Every structure is written in structure tokens, then in C-alpha cells.
């Protein structure tokens, strides 16, 4: 083809909107170029159209190599399609090369895939591959490898969405597995509202009361928590605890009791929260469930802040951090540091508060966690109110709220009574009209501007 796979520029290729005759001419050119490919090139070309957005070599090898196309042949065939400008190679420097198709070529390839009778099989292979990626990534999203795995999922967000769409009407179990595996990804990439929408449909469609349903309710409850949806959170937590009890699943029961403690804390019933957390911690320690020992100790620390016992709060939170060092969960570290910062604000040690909050905010910024930035900004607002610097406090609070809202989330939930006590002090100092104005100034800040404003006191 001498570099002339498709005549004309990209603009010519995509100009089919100018009229039916032009469209027919374009389609004829595509047919002509397609006919010049050998049989294996045609096969790979049409199968690549199953992908949405960009795709990796690994994905191509595992999705497109059916019985008539060997994995060993993929690399050479792909290189040929790139040489002929049918596929674009995306060189990202130190990262692995990815590939994509121009929209017009993708659409044409999809027509060829439909005509081949392979579409259903390719879609199933596509979905199976991306659920395997998501489930492999899920536990690693909180490990020391989490940055690389978050980037991998972010690279394939369009393919993950396509797999969710395809599985939704065809396989409720697969759809729920994929939705649940992406829980931390929804949160850390500021897609909480989207994640909640996927959970709502997936949980309603899957009616079996098994461990998968319990785990998905647990994860969906976490999404409700980040959205500050108390009713959704309470409902999902109670249901998943009921299922774990039916199954006699001790670790799950410990998780459920910890979540019911949060429900009680949210309602202001601190005594009930304490009982739930204490029981949950005992179960988690007996089951050697390290992650939930970390979570429950952190919950007890937050509860102690609300009870005004700052020494006990710091002890619980530092113990939570110590347990967390065993598996390096940066999300859990982020939350414990934030609570340590808020505890120091509330106990009057502002230099210590700044140390903890700066580290928490840096983690959120470095991992590009929208809510993981918004929450420490709110605690910086409480610290500013304690200094007292009411104008700074109200600007930071406004920035925090706007950033969290951009992700479909809320910046704080269970610590709101503590933070609001400090912010109310600032509002009284400047008056209602100026409070509104300063909050609006904060809401207008970009994320980077808000971070710099918080750090450059």
C-alpha cells in the first residue's frame, strides 16, 4: 500500500457529514483499502474495533486471538496495520505503548466485525479480559503498587465502561463483579457519582443473597458514604451484615459491625457506635483481618475526637497507622493523618496539626485523589478558624466543598460536627454576608490554587 492505506487527510476521512455522495465515496475508498489487506490483517483490523478508546498489546493478544489468529502473530500484524496508518501507536515515553483507531476507521471496522458474525464472541472476550484486569487491580489499588494500577485502570476507563454497558443486560453476576471491583477507582478518580449509578443498577439486578452480593453491598455502601447519602449507606450496610450473618461469615460480620458503628455515629449515638466498633475490632483481630483492624482503630480514634478525649484519639490513630505499615495502604494512611491533624486542631496544637495535614494533603495530591484532597482542605479550614483567621478558614472550606462536589461527593461526613463548630466561629466573626462572599472566593479556586493556598500559610 506504500503508506497510502486510506487516501486523503483525516479531515477527508471524517467528512461523511457533507452529503450522501461524499459518504459513498469515502466508504468505497475504505473498501478498496481494506481489500488490499491480507486475510489475517483484515481479521485483526475488524477485531480491534471491539475496543473503546485506546488499548494495550496485552489486551489485543488476549481478546483478538481466537482459534484462527495465533497470539504469536499479533505483534507483526499490529505493526503492519500501524505502518499502513490503520492503527495509531501512542508513545508515552517510559510507559508502555498503546494503540487506537481513528473514529472513522473504528466505525468501519465495527461494520466489518458485525458482518463477520464474530461480534458477540469478541464482546464476551473483551468483557472477560477487562473484568480480569479490574479484579486483579482491586486489591492492589491500596498496596504499594497502587499508583501503577490506578494508572492502568485510568488508561482503560473507556473499555471498562464498555464492558459495564455490555454486561449489564447479559450477565448480572459479571456486571456486579466488575462494578464492585472498581469501587476504589471510582473514589480515587473523582467518579463517585458515576460509581453510585453503576452500583444502583447492578445491586437491583442481582438478587442472589450470596457472598458476592454482600461484598458488593459493602462496596456500594462505601460509595454512599462518600456521597454523604445516609439512607443509602444505612440500607446497604444493614443488608450486607444480614447476608454475612446468614452465611456465618465472621470477617464480613466484623465489617458490618464497623459500618453500623458509623451509621450510629452519623446519627449522633456515640455509645452505640463505641459498642459496634469494640465488637468489630475484636472480631477483626480474631480473624487476623489486618485491613479492618486498621479501619476500626481509625474509627475509634475519630470517635474519641468527637468525645473530646484527644490523648486516646491520638493513641488509636497512631496504632491504626502502625498496623497499616504492614501493607502500605496510602488511602488508609491519608485518612489516619487527616484525623490526627483534626485531633491536633481540636486539642490546640496547631503546629502538629499542620504537620499531619500537610502530609495527608501531599498524599492526596500526589495520587490525584479528588476527595483525598478535598477533605484535608476542610481540616485546614478548621485549623485556620482556630488560629483564628476566619477569612482564610471560609475560603478553604469553600474550596473543599467545590472540589468534593466536582466528584459527586462530600468532603466530610462523620467529622462535620467538629469542623462546623470551628467554622461557625469564623462565620460569627465576619458576619453572614462576608461569610458567603469568602466561601464563594474559595469555591472559585482551582484545585492546585487551593492546595497552594493551604500549604503557603
Image (cartoon, rainbow, N blue to C red):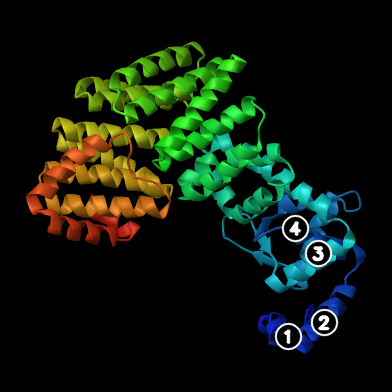
The answer to which of marks 3 and 2 sits earlier in the sequence is 2
Cα separation, mark 1 vs mark 2, equals 10 Å
Cα separation, mark 4 vs mark 1, equals 25 Å
- The reply to whether discs 3 and 1 touch (Cβ–Cβ < 8 Å) is no
Secondary structure found at label 2: helix
Quarter of the image for the N terminus: give it: bottom right
Secondary structure found at label 3: helix
Q: Is residue 175 above or below residue 44?
A: above
Please give the residue where the numbered disc 4 appears in the rendered image: 50
Query: Residue 280 location in percent, x, y?
Result: 43, 17
Secondary structure found at label 4: loop
- Residue at horizontal 44 percent and vertical 20 percent from the top: 257
The mark lying in front, picked from 4 and 1, is 4
- Residue at horizontal 73 percent and vertical 87 percent from the top: 19
Q: Residues within 10 Å of mark 3 (few under 14, many from 20)?
A: many
Q: Residues within 10 Å of mark 4 (few under 14, many from 20)?
A: many
Residue 347 in view, yes or no = yes
Q: Which mark is residue 45?
A: 3
Query: Residue 248 location in percent, x, y?
Result: 59, 14
Secondary structure found at label 1: loop
Query: Residue 410 location in percent, x, y?
Result: 36, 45
Residue 82: name its quadrant. bottom right
The answer to which of marks 2 and 4 sits earlier in the sequence is 2
- Relative to the observer, which residue lies in front, 235 or 259? 235
Cα separation, mark 2 vs mark 4, equals 22 Å
The answer to which of marks 4 and 1 sits earlier in the sequence is 1
The answer to which of marks 3 and 1 sits earlier in the sequence is 1
- The reply to whether discs 2 and 4 touch (Cβ–Cβ < 8 Å) is no
Please give the residue where the numbered disc 1 appears in the rendered image: 8
- Residue at horizontal 25 percent and vertical 42 percent from the top: 379
Q: Which mark is residue 29?
A: 2
The mark lying in front, picked from 3 and 4, is 4
Amino acid at each position: 500500500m506504500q503508506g497510502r492505506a486510506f487516501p486523503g487527510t483525516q479531515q477527508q476521512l471524517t467528512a461523511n457529514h457533507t452529503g450522501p455522495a461524499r459518504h459513498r465515496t469515502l466508504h468505497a475508498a475504505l473498501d478498496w483499502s481494506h481489500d488490499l489487506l491480507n486475510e489475517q490483517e483484515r481479521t485483526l483490523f475488524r477485531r480491534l474495533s471491539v475496543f473503546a478508546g485506546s488499548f494495550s498489546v496485552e489486551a489485543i493478544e488476549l481478546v483478538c486471538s481466537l482459534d484462527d489468529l495465533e497470539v504469536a502473530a499479533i505483534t507483526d500484524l499490529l505493526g503492519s496495520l500501524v505502518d499502513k496508518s490503520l492503527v495509531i501507536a501512542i508513545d508515552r515515553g517510559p510507559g508502555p505503548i498503546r494503540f487506537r483507531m481513528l473514529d472513522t476507521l473504528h466505525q468501519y471496522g465495527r461494520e466489518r466485525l458485525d458482518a463477520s458474525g464474530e461480534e458477540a464472541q469478541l464482546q464476551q472476550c473483551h468483557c472477560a479480559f477487562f473484568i480480569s484486569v479490574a479484579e486483579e487491580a482491586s486489591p492492589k489499588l491500596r498496596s504499594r503498587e497502587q499508583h501503577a494500577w490506578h494508572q492502568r485502570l485510568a488508561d482503560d476507563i473507556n473499555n471498562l465502561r464498555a464492558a459495564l454497558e455490555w454486561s449489564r443486560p447479559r450477565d448480572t453476576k459479571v456486571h456486579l463483579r466488575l462494578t464492585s471491583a472498581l469501587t476504589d477507582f471510582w473514589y480515587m478518580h473523582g467518579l463517585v457519582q458515576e460509581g453510585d449509578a453503576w452500583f444502583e443498577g447492578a445491586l437491583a439486578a442481582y438478587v442472589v443473597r450470596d457472598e458476592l452480593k454482600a461484598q458488593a453491598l459493602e462496596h456500594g455502601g462505601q460509595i454512599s458514604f462518600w456521597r454523604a447519602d445516609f439512607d443509602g449507606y444505612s440500607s446497604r450496610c444493614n443488608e450486607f451484615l444480614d447476608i454475612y450473618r446468614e452465611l456465618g461469615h465472621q470477617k464480613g460480620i466484623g465489617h458490618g459491625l464497623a459500618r453500623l458503628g458509623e451509621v450510629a455515629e452519623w446519627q449522633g449515638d456515640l455509645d452505640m457506635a463505641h459498642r459496634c466498633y469494640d465488637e468489630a475490632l475484636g472480631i477483626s483481630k480474631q480473624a487476623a483481618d489486618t485491613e479492618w483492624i486498621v479501619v476500626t482503630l481509625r474509627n475509634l480514634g475519630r470517635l474519641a475526637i468527637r468525645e473530646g478525649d484527644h490523648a486516646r484519639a491520638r493513641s488509636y490513630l497512631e496504632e491504626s497507622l502502625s498496623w497499616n505499615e504492614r501493607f502500605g495502604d496510602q488511602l488508609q494512611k491519608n485518612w489516619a493523618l487527616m484525623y490526627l491533624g483534626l485531633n491536633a486542631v481540636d486539642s490546640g496544637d496547631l503546629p502538629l496539626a499542620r504537620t499531619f495535614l500537610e502530609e495527608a494533603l501531599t498524599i492526596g495530591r500526589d495520587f490525584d485523589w479528588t476527595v483525598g484532597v478535598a477533605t484535608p482542605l476542610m481540616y485546614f479550614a478548621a485549623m485556620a478558624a482556630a488560629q483564628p483567621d476566619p477569612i482564610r478558614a471560609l475560603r478553604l472550606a469553600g474550596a473543599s466543598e467545590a472540589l468534593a462536589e466536582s466528584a459527586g461527593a462530600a468532603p466530610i461526613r462523620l467529622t462535620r460536627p467538629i469542623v462546623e463548630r470551628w467554622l461557625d466561629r469564623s462565620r460569627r466573626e465576619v458576619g453572614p454576608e462576608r461569610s458567603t462572599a469568602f466561601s464563594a472566593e474559595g469555591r472559585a479556586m482551582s484545585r492546585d490554587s487551593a492546595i497552594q493556598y493551604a500549604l503557603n500559610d
